[in-house]
Image: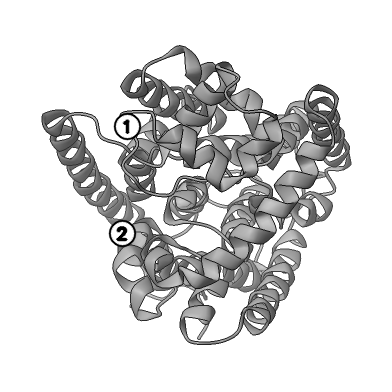
Amino acid sequence: MPCAGPASSAGVVEPSRERGLCGVILGLSMLVMIAHLAMTWRNGPSSSDFFVFWSTARILAGSLLETVADLYDPQALTALQQHYRWHTGEFHPFVYPPTMLPVIRPLAMFDYPSAEFLWLAVSLGILGWAVEGHRKPVRLLVIAAAPASLVNIAFGQTGFWTAALLAGGLLRLDRAPVCAGILIGLATIKPQLGLMIPLVLILARAWTVLVAATLTTGMMVALSALFHGFDLWLSWLAAVKMFSGQMTVNLDHLLPWLGSLAATLMSWGLSPPVAQLGQLALILALAAMLAGIARRADRPALIAAGLAATFAATPFCYAYDSVLLVPAVMLAAERMLLRSPSGPHLRLTLVAVWFAPFLSIGLMPHGLPVLPLAATALVGCLRAEERSRAGGQPATEGRTLPVTVSRLSPAARTGP
């Protein structure tokens, strides 16, 4: 069933009603966010995933390890974490690459509650800047109200950071290619989230961005090896392999929070190699859809689809990583409101992606991969929409977006 097609009187919603629907969804989501923050304030601070960042920063600042590479020794790290009052007895391994260490080191200067507040507030502010919320304040409201943001806040995780770096980079492909490349390169602090980004840059012919991102990544790796030694990278690779095996063993415990197709397939009883083949098939399908969207040279569509495909293609991710989908929903919704009235499929898909982080927590244990399916459906709808409009007469202004970039001014090429 196609996700979009020629508008018909029975299957469209006028822009005013679409805006009203968006307003209702934003309002309800904001009420949920306010309620959660009020409960958090009432109950006081509690330990979360953020503990691993804060405790690792404190351990590094106090030089409590014989070597930095011991960060990737779960027994050595846990033995030191137990001395902090915020340790709850849960397992908090540090599985991030060495390039993450400069990001978390400043956290050692603050107590746990203050550090977590600053971690979330600063990263949320950077995400607001990345999506140009200073130019379009409604985008700040979208980010603040998103269910994915609530999940990230509850876990004290990196969702705001990675979404800011990847979305900020893609939104600046044409206007500031070097800055875009640096942002994307910095996003390698979570390398599994960048699986589709090189393809998006190639399809966008953003060669300067690709070079800048590659150089930034190389410099980060080189500097970390210079300060800590290359053995630290070998220790990290060994830790990734070890924890990948442990994830399979502890799958039932982790499943509510996971967000990949591969994790779902393993929960069905399939072996990890077979699950990865299923993930590879999804990646190839996403790549084909992105290539189809890129032929239309519609930057906002390619960026929105690229962000959604980046999440769906990731073989290992959690629900809080779905903050990456918020800019994708935002861009797709803006395109929907700027164009002629849309059919129901795109609207329903956007609503599904919006609420998917909440739904996933309840449905993933039952073998339903809500997040990757919703993200893939968004890419498919954008592809179908572009295909359905391919035979029409595009305009460079008004309610439709351009077909080619070469005919536009530099300001118009950048997209929202």
Amino acid type shown at disc 1: Trp
Residue 326 screen position, x and y as percent = 46, 48
Residue occupying the point 86% across, 35% down: 218
Residue at the spot 11% in from the left edge and 30% down from the top edge: 42
Circle 2: is it few (<14), some (14-19), or many (20+) Cα within 10 Å? some
Q: Position of residue 335 (x, y in %)?
A: 51, 51
Q: Quadrant of the C terminus?
A: top right
> Looking at the image, which is closer to me, 356 or 138?
356
- Tell me the kind of residue under disc 2: Phe
Q: Secondary structure at mark 1?
A: loop
User: Does 90 appear above or below 53?
Assistant: below
- Say which quarter of the image contains residue 94: top right
Q: Report the front residue among 308 and 95.
A: 95
**Disc 2/disc 1 C-alpha distance (Å):** 26 Å
The numbered dot on residue 313 is none
The residue at which mark 2 appears reads as: 358
Q: Earlier in the sequence, mark 2 or mark 1?
A: 1
Q: Residue at x 46, y 22 (%)?
A: 122
Please name the residue shown 39% across and 31% down the image: 140
Question: For numbered disc 2, what is the local secondary structure?
Answer: helix
In terms of image quadrants, where is residue 367?
bottom left
For mark 1, what is the residue? 86
Q: Along the line of sight, which residue is nearer the eye, 356 or 106?
A: 106
Q: Is residue 224 left or right of residue 268?
A: right
Mark 2 vs mark 1: give the one in front: 1
Picture layout, residue 355 above or below residue 236:
below
Q: Is residue 46 left or right of residue 243?
A: left
Foreground pick, 240 / 212: 240
Query: Can you say whether 74 is above or below 46 in the image?
Result: below
Q: Position of residue 56 (x, y in %)?
A: 53, 30
Is residue 43 visible in the rendered image? The answer is yes
